[in-house]
């Protein structure tokens, strides 16, 4: 099965033979799936029959996977299994970011209460309390937005990739309901 048949983007001319793009589907399809999940777009339109990239009427070959309309055809909607996989992907991405932020804030609150618990309420313990809260708020937000985004993206993409591969296998053996 070629990359185009698998719904993957062809390798760029300068890419090494073992290189693999992170994203399975096009950025345009990801944005469209986000709009569908947010209720801003219907699951209707003209999509590549191979990779589900949104198509224009004048497109001859899919700009994402390179499949021609004559070979892959078009579909009127993205299969619900792909939309559900994208929803699970976004959920996992958010779960990781929020978890890291809340863990950091919890550690900050606990550490900020230590001076108050052992030294009583004085000007320096109050200063330490608010200083530690501010530090851990900023620290946890930055860690969540850097490491959390990266870890969440990889975890979410792995979930989406498994669902995509299962869909391709089902589509190849004819058991996929592409509606």
Image (tube, rainbow, N blue to C red):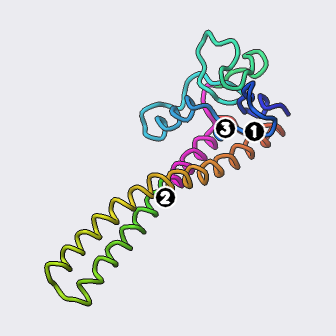
Circle number at residue 24? 3
Q: Would you say residue 77 sits in the magenta stretch?
A: yes
Q: Earlier in the sequence, mark 3 or mark 1?
A: 1
Is the residue 49 above or below the residue 85 in the image?
above
Q: Report the span colored magenta.
A: 76-93
Residue labelled with disc 1: 19
What kind of element bears circle 2? helix
Residue labelled with disc 2: 95
Q: Is residue 178 left or right of residue 88?
A: right
Which of the image's four quarters has the N terminus?
top right
What kind of element bears circle 1? loop
Question: Is the stretch drawn in magenta largely helix, strand or loop?
Answer: helix
Coordinates of residue 59 in the picture (x, y in percent): 64, 13
Task: Compare residues 20 and 40 and report the one nearer the observer.
Answer: 20
Task: Compare residues 17 and 10 and report the one nearer the observer.
Answer: 17
Which of the 4 quarters of the picture holds residue 151? bottom right
Which of the 4 quarters of the picture holds residue 118? bottom left
Q: Residue at x 55, y 35 (%)?
A: 30
Is the residue 97 above or below the residue 28 in the image?
below
Q: Residues within 10 Å of mark 1 (few under 14, many from 20)?
A: few
Q: Residues within 10 Å of mark 2 (few under 14, many from 20)?
A: some
């Amino acid at each position: 099965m070629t990359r185009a048949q698998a719904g993957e983007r062809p390798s760029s001319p300068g890419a090494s033979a073992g290189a693999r793009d992170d994203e399975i589907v096009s950025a345009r399809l990801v944005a469209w799936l986000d709009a569908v999940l947010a209720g801003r777009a219907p699951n209707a339109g003209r999509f590549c029959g191979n990779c589900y990239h949104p198509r224009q009427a004048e497109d001859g070959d899919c700009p994402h996977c390179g499949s021609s309309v004559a070979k892959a055809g078009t579909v009127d909607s993205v299969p619900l299994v792909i939309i559900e996989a994208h929803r699970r992907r976004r959920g996992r991405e958010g779960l990781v970011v929020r978890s890291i932020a809340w863990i950091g804030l919890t550690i900050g609150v606990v550490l900020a209460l230590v001076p108050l618990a052992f030294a009583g309420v004085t000007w320096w313990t109050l200063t330490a309390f608010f200083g530690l809260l501010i530090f851990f708020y900023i620290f946890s937000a930055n860690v969540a937005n850097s490491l959390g985004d990266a870890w969440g993206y990889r975890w979410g993409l792995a979930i989406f990739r498994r669902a995509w591969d299962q869909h391709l296998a089902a589509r190849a053996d004819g058991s996929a309901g592409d509606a």
